[in-house]
Image: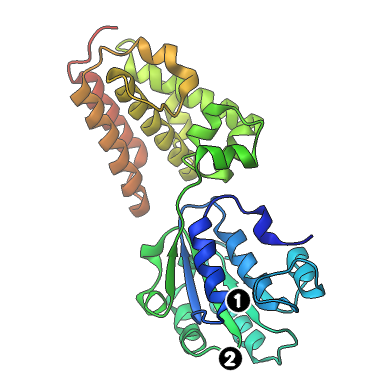
Amino acid sequence: MAKIVDRIKGHEKNIKHLNASLSSESLAPAYLFVGLPGIGKQLVAKHMAQSLACETANIACGQCGSCIRIEKGQSEALLEIKPQSSMIKIESAQKIIQFLSLRSLSRGRTVIVHDAHKMNQQTANALLKSVEEPPEHSHFIFVTSQVGMILPTIRSRSQQVHFSPLSIDELKAIAPKAPEWALYSSQGRMDIVQQLLNEGESHQRSDFINMFFSIMHPQGNINSMKDWLGDKENTQKLLETWQQLTRDLLFVKKNLQPLIHRDQVEQFQNYRSLDEQNLNGFFWGLSRILKDMEFNVDRLLSLEDLVADFRNNDLREI
């Protein structure tokens, strides 16, 4: 069987709603799938494409030639557009328009635009007419993790479908051998679970955790954090990991569950005496730096200032 929907974990309500529209042939011309990366939005989009192309039913049978070709990525009924060099350029819009101009040999066809927030204005404007009035039995699915960056002209012409992070049980169903700390650290994202299980990522996490507890200790050495701040992606990972650890430490102080980094419980217990207000300030300071990174603010200087404020703010002896 080649039914893509069988590979999807979670999102039952969304799938039920979309399947009802497929069954009644009342789909919108364009959809905007919104949610965190790595939670299954792309698989749901492929399920839609498979169903629209299916030769025997309104919802994919998984057995006909069209369903099998969609599942293998070899179908003339599906065009997938992905960013090149971090942007979806006008050439992609021209490719879509050409695809839609060809005579369709299938029951229905689909254009899936991955990371749609990376379309520049020229690309989005070139697609407006096609999105608003696509050829019969043709549909757009824009997939994004940053809906605020989608141009209003595309947002207003698309029906939004919001996807929630995966639950721990859903992540376990996909990766039954993954340790619990990885599942909780992922914040519902399967791509993060896979990264954390990578040996290099595991070492990186250990470094981030060691640096965090060095910051928490008045005599801790914090010089090594500079080594990770030259690369924007690594900086983001570092800040997000420290946010999670700060949140966990606040949870331990209040005897709350669940912890994200539950394998660090003994370490957290050693720092229960830290000032709650100071920890909250550190958490929101990390959030501010993450947001400022979008505007190319000096992340090293910002983080050094935040750490200095935290350590000078009546940090108690451990």
Element on which disc 2 rests: loop
Q: Is residue 222 visible?
A: no
- Tell me where residue 175 sits by quadrant: top right
> How far across and down, in percent of the image, does residue 288 sit?
28, 43
Nearest the camera: 152 or 289?
A: 152
Q: Residue at x 49, y 85 (%)?
A: 126
Q: Residue at x 25, y 16 (%)?
A: 274
Q: Residue at x 44, y 29 (%)?
A: 260
> How far across and down, in percent of the image, does residue 261 sit?
46, 25
Residue 135's disc number? 2
How many angstroms separate mark 1 from mark 2 (CA)?
A: 12 Å
Quarter occupied by the N terminus: bottom right
Q: How is the image coloured?
A: rainbow
> Callout 1 environment at 10 Å: few (<14), some (14 to 19), or many (20+)?
many
**Relative to 23, does residue 98 appear above or below in the rendering?**
below
Residue 91's disc number? none
> How far across and down, in percent of the image, does residue 263 sit?
50, 19
**Relative to 152, does residue 310 appear above or below in the rendering?**
above
> How far across and down, in percent of the image, does residue 318 sit?
29, 7
| Residue designated by label 1 | 111
**Relative to 241, does residue 40 appear above or below in the rendering?**
below
> Callout 2 environment at 10 Å: few (<14), some (14 to 19), or many (20+)?
some
**Badge 1 or badge 2: first in the primary sequence:** 1
Nearest the camera: 125 or 18?
A: 18
